[in-house]
Amino acid sequence: MLSQEPTTNVVKKSRYNYQLSEIIRQRAWVEIDQGALSHNVRQLRAFLSPSTELMAVVKADAYGHGAITVAQTVLRSGATRLAIATLGEGIELREAGIIAPIVVLGAVNNPEEIAALCHWNLEPTICTPQQAITFSKTLAELEQTLLVHLKLDTGMSRLGTLWHQATEFVTLVHKLPYLKIVSIYSHLATADDPDPTVMKMQQKRFEDAIHQIKAMGIDPPCLHLANSAAVLSDRSLHYDLVRVGLAMYGLYPAPHLESTINLKPVLQVKAKITQVKTLAAGTGVSYGYQYISKQDIKIAVVSIGYADGIPRNLSNRLKVLLRGQFVQQIGAITMDQMMLDVSNLPDVEVGEIVTLIGFDGKNSISADDWANALGTISWEILCSFKHRLPRIGKRLD
Ligand SMILES: *Cc1c(COP(=O)(O)O)cnc(C)c1O
């Protein structure tokens, strides 16, 4: 039989579409609803005063949603700037032809990176006087000027010059050649906490520092402090610009902020059933037999696993949606596959689609549900889906 098959690689014209763009829908994928994304940006835009700019935070591949398409959609929907964490993330957006201002939130310290910032027209965050001096020297050699954003540490204890040393820092940068200050900003540590005490303390430190900087005759063109939680919790934190990540992707930073604006989740995770069978009572399922059937059960194998970013810690605790109903996952989640107990849906077939995060009929499962089950935050869940899962547009059928 086999020896009679044609030996050439040329595929005969067939009725099947074997292009990668079709094949990626065959196993498991992340579905991105650009309409929901656009809706969220418009909701945020309407919530902000017209003079406050919306900077879309698209770091970490837009929280796992796909940075390029997300950037294109949010810029069309009302965002005017983009923020990323790493130089590589900025270059990816520029290579895709995006021309909006891009701020690098992470620290950049060495001359090669500084030269790349110039080449790709990316705006760095300057965190210390030493870093500012390195920048100015390198830029002198390159004969280039960079637009820069200065970071103050008002209590996050991460990047930035401490608020009580802000005046010296900003005065130095102001005097250095080749650096042009675009904004001064800080980041909040507890904006999602219903108790605003720490946030208000940080705001006061920020305002005191800015007051002193202005007293030195320096007038920063743009001030910003707010992430998603701060945007939704206190309008006095908006200033000239807000840096929004999570809310844009349709999730609320904390339960007490759910009544503020209407957000729609953008990301769904789906996979297909690849085999269905009946197991006798007393049969072990998956590695380690963490699950043993109590009676005869019908199981479905689903083609998604921890190598796709499904946390193995959810084994035996995960519920998924199939035909609009909640179905229990059973046994250890494996690298590429997992099993479901579909005893209540005896006519389930190979090829049916399972929703792990998202909507099916009246029911839904959110990244918050997973975060709560795992003792983590929805930000980490969104960022955890691997590149093996293609990001595809929402299907209209
Ligand atoms: C990631 C990040 C944001 C966005 O935070 P969200 O809570 O997702 O809105 C804002 N500012 C800085 C400095 C960040 O690193």
Image: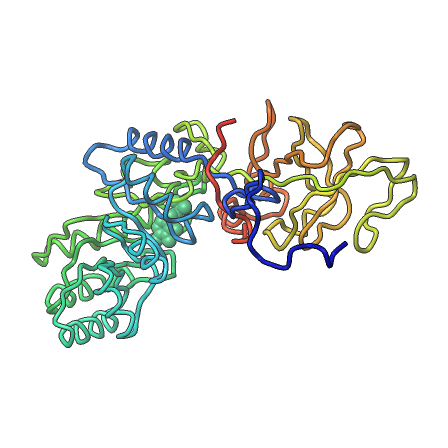
Q: Quadrant of the N terminus?
A: bottom right
Q: By what rule are the colours in the image chosen?
A: rainbow
Q: Residue 323, percent across and down?
A: 66, 27
Q: Which residue is found at the position 53% from the left and 38% from the top? A: 268
Q: Tell me residue 43's x, y (percent).
A: 34, 29
Q: Position of residue 272 (x, y in %)?
A: 65, 39
Residue 188 makes an appearance in the image: no
Viewer-nearest residue: 225 or 318: 318
Residue beneath the point at 15% across and 52% down: 220
In the rendered view, tell whether residue 151 sits above or below residue 264: below
Q: Is residue 256 above or below residue 241?
A: above
Vertical placement of residue 340 versus 99, above or below: above
Residue 239: image quadrant is top left
Is residue 35 left or right of 339 when viewed as pictured? left
Residue that sits furthest to the top in the current view: 362
Residue at 79 percent across and 51 percent down: it is: 286
Residue 383 coordinates in the image, percent (x, y): 50, 50
Q: Count all numbered tags in the image, as a single digit.
A: 0
Side (left or right) of 101 relative to 42: left
- Left or right of 114 on screen, residue 251: right
Point out the residue furthest to the front here: 4
Residue 386 or residue 328, whichever sits in front? 386
Write down the quadrant of residue 278 in the picture. Answer: top right
The answer, for residue 88, to whether it is visible in the render is: yes
Q: Is residue 55 left or right of residue 361?
A: left
